[in-house]
Every structure is written in C-alpha cells, then in structure tokens.
Amino acid sequence: WIWESETEEGLFGSEKSIKSMKDNMALFMEDESYDKYCHRRYDDISNSSECRMPWSNLNMFYASSWDVDKVQSVIDTLAFEYPKNVDLYNTLAPCALGKYYCPDNADEMDVSWAIMLNENITSIADKWDFKGEFNADNLDQTNLFAAYMKELDLWKHYVDFGLDKKFSIDNPVSKFSRAVLFWGSPLNFTGNKLASEISEEEEEMDEKYENYLKSYVIDTFLEKMNNFTESSYSNELNSYYFMGILIFEVILEIVTRDAMLTIISIVFVFFYIRLQVRSWFLALIEFFSSLTHCAYFW
C-alpha cells in the first residue's frame, strides 16, 4: 500500500488517517484464510509459526504495549545536547551489540551508556508487532520517537521505509507512507535449473502454484481494494496499491472499462446524428464519414 495525506498534520498525526491505513492492512490480515498465504516465520524451539509482520510504521501505533516513560527517557537522552548523544551512539553502536569493532579509545562509561540505551530501544521496538490497540493517546511522542530513530544508523531502517524524506526531528510530519505485506511462496519445482533443463511437467507445476495466490487476491480482495482507492473513501488520505501479479488484471479492467465507454459514446453519437438528419441511411453515411476523417478533426 502507498498513502498520501491531504492534511497538514500528515498521515501519522491524524487518528482518522491512521485508522484508515490500518483498515487497508486489516482487509488482508484479518481474513480467515490469510494465514494460509502469508509468509510464515518458524520457531524451531516451540515448533510453531506465525505470519510475518508487515513492513510498516503502523506497527509502532499498534504495538502490543507502549512504555511511555521508557520512550520518553530515550527521547530525552538523544535530545540532550543534540546531536552529541546521537553521534556518540552511532559511533558506539557496534560496541552495544557485543563490543565488536569498538574504537580503541572508547571510554568504558560511554560504552556502558550505549549498551543500556540500545537495550531500552530494543525492548521498545520488540513490541512493534501490530497486535495491540491503537495508541491514540501518544501520537506526538510516537512520531518524535520515530524521528530520533531515523537519526540512528542501527535503527533507522525500522522507521525510514514508511516515512517521507522531509520527516525529521524538527518536522515529525509525513505526507507519504507505504507498507508491504509479505506473501508466502510455494515450492519452486524448477529451482535454479537452466531453461533447457526444466521439464514441461515442472514448469506446469510452478505455474499452477503461482496462480493460487493470484486467484486468492483477485477473488477475495480486489473489489474492496479498488473501493479503498476511490476518492470518496477518505477526505484525509489517498490510498494506492501495487502488486505484481495484479498488473495484467488491473490493466485488463481499465481497458475493458474504457472500451465500454468508447462503445457507448459511439452509439450515442450515431443516434444523435440520426435524430438530427431524420434518416437512418444519412446517419450511417455521416457516422462512417466522421470515423474515417477522425484524423482531420484531431
């Protein structure tokens, strides 16, 4: 999904916009058959699996828990004498991960500070699982926290994907955002074989399984997805979608609709001419004359 805000407060500054984006994602994620098609992550210890979380900043706003005090503590730490502490953390981040690649002259107290800060950020980010209630009471804090995360080399990839380039500490407002749902893939029967090595049976099996997801999305979601992209859906944002397997279907739908409109227009023009000249023969002559001279009229 791709979203564009129509308000000054941006996508993540408006409760209505956030809920609308969430509805776009929930269309898939709350479907009873979604877990059969999603990309699954497996836990060898518990011998269980679950759908992979979407890549979206909405994960922050629907975290399973939000520790206001801990988040504010991280913000205050990074904001103190900005950008001093941000630069220090970026320098010592490898140390914080396990004291690898630490500068030779790194101060032990600074390293301990970086480790503690990293642990706090990790404990916060671990709750970004899209499983909680909407954190509507802390929108400003969440956006400011994301702005500081964007400054940290080790953490910016968690938030940068869903924010526009103008989003910053001084301007924690994002006009654009995007999210990715991860779909599972069936077994690849052809593997890494060369085209000459692939049998006809293997190729048919690959094509068969690739069509499963396409059929599921088209039959279950496509109509509702198109409804979400209508301008009447929301007065605060515009929604767009992109999915490779839908390109042909969407183009075919557009061409079919345009063709129908063209036919309706042609029929209307023909009957309009008939009413004016009051002769079927003259109307037919005039109509075909217009078609053959369309280049002249252009």
Image: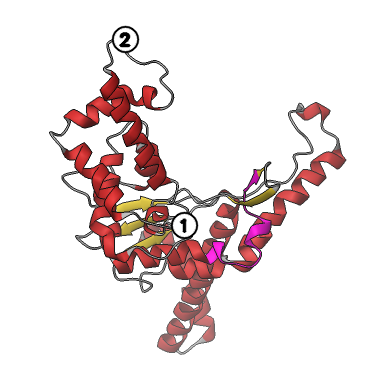
Please name the residue shown 87% across and 42% down the image: 201
Give the residue at mark 2.
Answer: 104
- Position of residue 73 relative to residue 289, above or below, is above
Indicate the quadrant containing the N terminus: top left, top right, bottom left or bottom right: bottom left
Residue 14 occupies quadrant:
bottom left
Q: Which residue is mark 1?
A: 130
What amino acid type is highlighted by mark number 2? Asp
Q: How is the image coloured?
A: secondary structure
Does 235 sit above or below residue 125?
below
Would residue 97 be counted in the magenta stretch?
no
| Helix, strand or loop under label 2 | loop
Q: Quadrant of the C terminus?
A: bottom left
Q: Which mark is residue 96?
A: none
| 248 relative to 94, above or below | below
Q: Position of residue 211 (x, y in %)?
A: 71, 53
- Residue positioned 36% across, 56% down in the render: 66
- Residue type of the residue flagged with mark 1: Phe
Question: Residue 174: in sight, yes or no?
Answer: no
Q: Which residues are magenta?
A: 27-42
Percent position of residue 250, x then y: 54, 59
Earlier residue among tags 1 and 2: 2
- Residue 214, horizontal then vertical, whole percent: 65, 56
The residue under the point 52% across, 66% down is 27
Of residues 206 and 24, the one drawn nearer to the viewer in this rendering: 24
Judge depth for marks 1 and 2 and give the one in front.
2
